[in-house]
Image: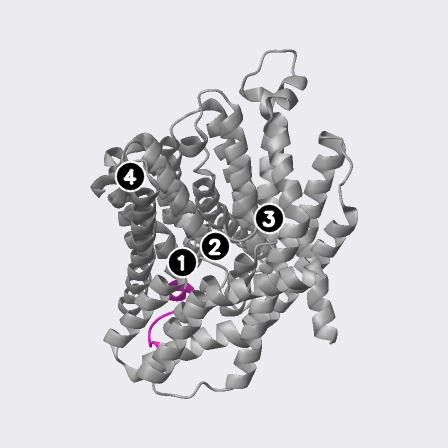
Amino acid sequence: MDYITDLFSTFIGTVIDVAPIVLILAVFQYGVLKKQVPMLKAKAIGLFYVILGLSLFLLGLEKALFPLGELMATQLTAYEFIASGTDGTIDWTSYYWVYLFAFAIGFSTTIAEPSLLAVAIKANQVSGGAIGLWGLRLSVALGVGVGITLGVYRIVVGDPIHYYIITGYIFVVIQTNFAPKMIIPLAYDSGGVTTSTVTVPLVAALGLGLASTIEGRSPLIDGFGLIAFASLFPIIAVMAYAQITEYLTNKAKSGATKCISN
Amino acid sequence: MKAFLQSMLSSTKDLLPIVVVIGFFQLFVLQQPLPNLFEIIIGLLMVITGLTFFVFGLEKALFPLGESMANAFARKGSVFWLLMFAFFLGFGTTIAEPALIAVAAKAGDIAATAGAIANNPESIEQYSLGLRISVALSVGLAIVLGVLRILKGWPIQRVIIIGYILVVIMTYFAPKEIIGIAYDSGGVTTSTITVPLVTALGVGLASAIKGRNPMLDGFGLIAFASLLPMIFVMAYGMIY
């Protein structure tokens, strides 16, 4: 019975979130474009599916995964746990389980991220299948995993965040000149879509847990910044994915022409 | 029905990595039993069903809505109304975004602790409301900028690189406490419903306008929506 009432209140919450969007769409559709929505009924049903789906998704995460994941982030970053894995002296290498957890949780939550799935479906349609659903999602997930691990390392050693982010930017700018043109807009987009409903709560718990257990870090200042890493590294990963695919195709092609010329 | 089951199966695959990661760390690294196994299984079933419904609704409602509106605006030919629509779509979806509300509230606490504003509830609330409005404005402007780019056919990297340079310069002048939040605010602004709508809008516009390639010109709106808030939040920190 609890589930029904919880589901109902989450559903109402999602409806309230979606209401301004629907209002804007309706005002422009009827006020400015002055046209009927084609297949209005099917779209209304579809919108209902989206809201119902998101409510179920969020409630399920809150019931099953978030409490456990957040508790885990706190336990893994606790002083006693870190100290138990070493011979007494703690330096940045003592946090190996935290790094592994950061990578794994970044990777796995990104695979489940609904907005990334939406962009991957669209990119697959637009590219006529050239950009695979899984190719894009796996490279974005790898990017998020690596990004969050590096972000966690930054909190442990206490470097200023902008050194890392600016270096990342320089890397992106250089890589843009070499990556296949077609992928560039999609790569830039994938930075923004990676972090929404699933990734943010778990990653924020990890950052805050770390920043509050390490001496000299302030959870308010150092706890932030992990999302920034998670939005930067997928750009690099997606461009790299396209570069590798292009390289392999070219190699296969030149290999084929060699065979013919022989 | 068969399509629904197949979709359920792929949602299960999407969720499997999280389950493996959490299970592994709980059982092997922390060496603790799984609490409330029954609740977890019910929760997981809800997540899987939810994801399946979401993907179904995506193809039925959000993608076609975004695309048909992009087409209608392209046929109407009024750049003014298209840009107005772009602005309101960005502004309206961001101002109510729960992740942003949470981040803005935290930013208010930080500013109060750092002594940038008076440490009482009213001034903190005022500060975080101002922050929310400036982020929402920046997302609105970002979508406008992105739509203009599609109309004009500017190469995306030029606009983005100019944005990066601005971010780097402003980082040196912005108050230190705001930098982490500013960098994060880029990522949190784009919600699960905005992303498909905005993507469909961009791709729809690029397919409707002659001489634009949906792959080259259609994507990139989200990139602007995650870059501009960083600049606006730092500016807010500097001005306030």
- Badge 2 vs badge 1, beta-carbon distance below 8 Å: yes
Task: Give the image quarter of residue A133.
Answer: bottom right
Instruction: Residue A213: tell me if it is visible.
Output: yes
Badge 4 and badge 2 in a common chain: no
Q: Which residue is mark 1?
A: B222
Vertical placement of B58 versus A29: above or below?
above
Q: Residue drawn at (45%, 68%), measured in percent from left and top?
A: B197
Q: Is residue B240 left or right of residue B5?
A: left
**Label 3: how many residues lie within 10 Å, few (<14), some (14-19) or many (20+)?**
many
Whether marks 1 and 4 lie on the same chain: yes
* Tag 2 residue: A193
Q: Earlier in the sequence, mark 2 or mark 3?
A: 3
Q: Magenta residues, as a range?
A: B209-218
Percent position (x, y) of residue B168? 28, 39
Do the residues indicated by labels 2 and 3 lie within the same chain of the protein? yes
Give SS at disc 1.
helix
Which residue is the site of mark 4? B168
Real-space Cα separation, disc 4 to disc 2, in angstroms: 22 Å
x and y, in percent, of residue A110 in the image: 57, 50
Q: Chain of mark 1?
A: B
Q: Amino acid at mark 4?
A: Val
Q: Given the image, on which type of amino acid does mark 2 rest?
A: Val
Disc 4 is attached to a residue of which chain?
B
Chain designation of label 3: A
Q: Nearer the viewer, residue B110 or B165?
A: B110
Residue type at tag 3 = Thr
Q: Chain of mark 2?
A: A
Q: Which residue is mark 3?
A: A109
